[in-house]
């Protein structure tokens, strides 16, 4: 797998990712982004660049995560993990990710309806 630059709001990560993940990261603006991918395995991340330090580091960023927030974000859609990729030197946020799960996989396949207030 070729090394790919994945952009976040506070820098970027260079990682080895599959063609499928490359397609997910492509939002059609000529750059690839971290957020649509979700959590990357640490062994696939090769280096990171921090906008705050204005420096590239030859190692993966640190991952800070909140597991099991169990926040219902839409009908039948639960946020199960929220995380951040942060600079190893200054702890600045390079990018964020979210992992979602459906309560009932067979219910409303392909739809996520907002919760009523």
Image (cartoon, helix red, strand yellow):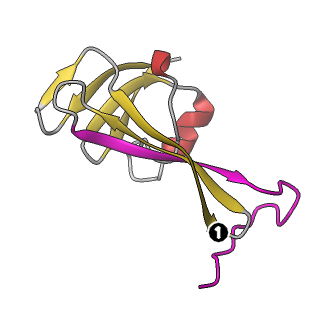
Residue underneath mark 1: 74
Examine the rendering and report whether any part of residue 2 can be seen.
no
Q: Position of residue 79 (x, y in %)?
A: 59, 54
Whether residue 108 is in magenta: the answer is yes
**In the rendered image, the vertical position of residue 35 relative to residue 110, given as above or below:** above
Residue 10 falls in image quadrant? top left
Check the image and name the residue furthest to the right. 106
Q: Position of residue 112 (x, y in %)?
A: 69, 67
x 52%, y 24%: residue: 41
- SS state under label 1: strand
- Front residue of this view, candidates 71 and 62: 71
**In the rendered image, the vertical position of residue 115 relative to residue 67, given as above or below:** below
Residue 107 falls in image quadrant? bottom right
Whether residue 49 is in magenta: the answer is no
Instruction: Give the residues in magenta.
Output: 92-117
- Front residue of this view, candidates 107 and 8: 107
Q: Does the magenta stretch mainly form a helix, a strand or a loop?
A: loop
Crowding near pointer 1: few (<14 within 10 Å), some, many (20+)?
A: some
- Front residue of this view, candidates 102 and 11: 102
Examine the rendering and report whether any part of residue 97 can be seen.
yes
- Front residue of this view, candidates 105 and 36: 105
Q: Would you say 102 lies left or right of 96 here? A: right
């Amino acid at each position: 797998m070729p090394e790919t630059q994945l952009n976040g709001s506070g820098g970027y990560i260079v990682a080895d990712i599959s063609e499928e993940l490359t397609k997910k990261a492509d939002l059609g603006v000529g750059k690839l982004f971290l957020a649509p991918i979700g959590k990357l395995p640490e062994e696939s991340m090769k280096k990171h660049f921090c906008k705050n330090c204005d420096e590239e580091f030859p190692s993966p960023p640190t991952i800070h995560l909140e597991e099991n927030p169990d926040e219902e974000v839409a009908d039948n859609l639960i946020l199960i993990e929220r995380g951040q990729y942060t600079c190893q030197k200054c702890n600045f946020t390079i990018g964020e990710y979210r992992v979602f799960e459906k309560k009932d996989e067979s219910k409303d396949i392909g739809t996520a309806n907002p919760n009523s207030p």
